[in-house]
Amino acid sequence: MALLKAFVSSTCYDLNIVRTQLRAYLQTLGHEPVMSDYNDVLFDPRSHTHESCIKEIDNADVVILIIGSRYGGTAIPKAVNSLDLENLKSLSKGNKLLDSPDKISITQLEILKAIESNIPIFTFIDARVLHDHLFYEKNKDKGILDKLEFPSIEKKESALFIFEFINFIRLRSKNNSVVEFNKFSDIEDYLKKQWSSLFQRLLFESRLVKSESRRLEAFSDELKDIKSLILSSIATGQAKEVGRGVLKYRRLIDFLYSSNHSNIYQILLQNSSWDDLLQSLNIQDIVVVDQSSRLRPLVYLVKDDGTFYEARYTLSLIQKFASDWGAFSQLPQAVKQEVVSALSENFSNEFIGRPLRYRDIQFSDFIKDQENRKGNSTTTTTINPTTFNTSEEEEEEEE
């Protein structure tokens, strides 16, 4: 049975007693605490310990952050550079901390990684530190900070970075609650109530999802009835064939129109193979990139000039488009023209919701940049479009 993994992030020396109590509490609840000072983190001998710590974050279900009087050691540049700092800046109004990446501590780095990985964070701040933070906020723009000392902070020079770290957390657009504590029981009581409430909400939302699923199923049946009614109301002949074509090939035409090719209308009316179609759109390769076990593989359509499209659809759906194109291209020319004309009128030039997004950069440079920012390698697989097949199950589902 898998246990909830709770990564505890804090400085160790000043918070040793609290960390020990928290570890015992988590184990009593049946959870698995992950703490570097108890050898719960895999310190890969091929990497720096800082890199090992942030890699362990991705294995956590929740992160518990405790902020006390110490700043801790400064993180190595390689570990800091593995994060997307520009994106992190957009997630909080208090991003002054990120203006000095060379001053980011290992504890702060762990939390930034958790934020980047969208892992829930529960933040607890020593009441004395939080009191001094209020004093800092009231005086930070008066030009007197270098003359002030904060009783709760062990080293004067680290006060700025501790307080701005608090600002980054509390001024986030979500998951920004901070809780002060005087003693460990404050942390214990808060986690007990919060996790119980989250469990209750999970059960409620699970019931809600089942209810919504039934509603969507009923709505889908109604749409099928409407589809049948529309087709039955159209006279036999070309009009009915056009109606069927609009319903069946809408997603295919939307997908191809998203390429924004200047000659797309004429290309869609050609009687060509899927491979020839892609060549007409200057698409050379279809590449699947597997970046993380938490994410589904991403699909990219690489053009002959090295630039590329990001696809919103899965590879299996694009494979089905190849099958659909074979059937569409065999339609009578007059029917194809009517179908394309009808669907192109409804196509939006806005990117939001479009199946393809064009990126005017080299695909090889894009992959290298992704690897450098994520700190790990990606697996890329080039798919031969001529080998595309569609399973009977997918075809039946689309109908």
Image (cartoon, helix red, strand yellow):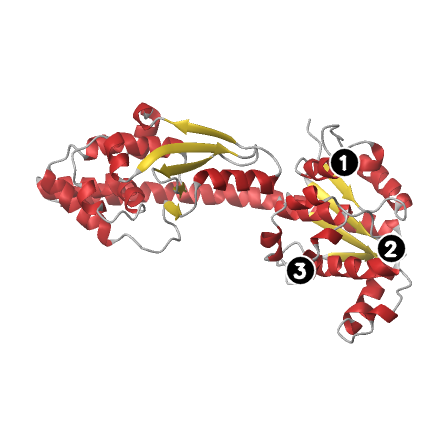
Q: Position of residue 222 (x, y in %)?
A: 31, 44
- Asked if marks 3 and 2 touch (Cβ < 8 Å), the reply is no
Q: Nearer the viewer, residue 293 or 28?
A: 293
* Image location (x, y in percent) of residue 364: 46, 37
Whichever of labels 3 and 2 marks the residue nearer the N terminus, that label is 2
Quick check: can you spot residue 194? no
For marks 1 and 2, the one nearer the N-term is 1
Residue type (three-letter) at the residue carrying disc 1: Thr
Q: Quadrant of residue 153?
A: bottom right
**Amino acid bearing label 3:** Asn
**Marks 3/2: CA–CA distance:** 21 Å
Instruction: Please state which of the two labelled residues, at mark 3 or mark 2, is closer to the viewer.
Output: 3
Q: Which residue is mark 2?
A: 69
Front residue of 24 and 206: 24
Secondary structure category for the residue under label 1 = helix
Name the residue carrying label 1.
49
Q: What separation in Å lies between label 1 and label 2 (alpha carbons)?
A: 23 Å
Q: Secondary structure at mark 3?
A: loop
| Lower sequence index among marks 3 and 1 | 1
Asked if disc 3 and disc 1 are in contact, CB closer than 8 Å, the reply is no
Q: Percent position (x, y) of residue 225? A: 26, 42
Q: Report the side of 162 relative to 94 (left or right).
A: right
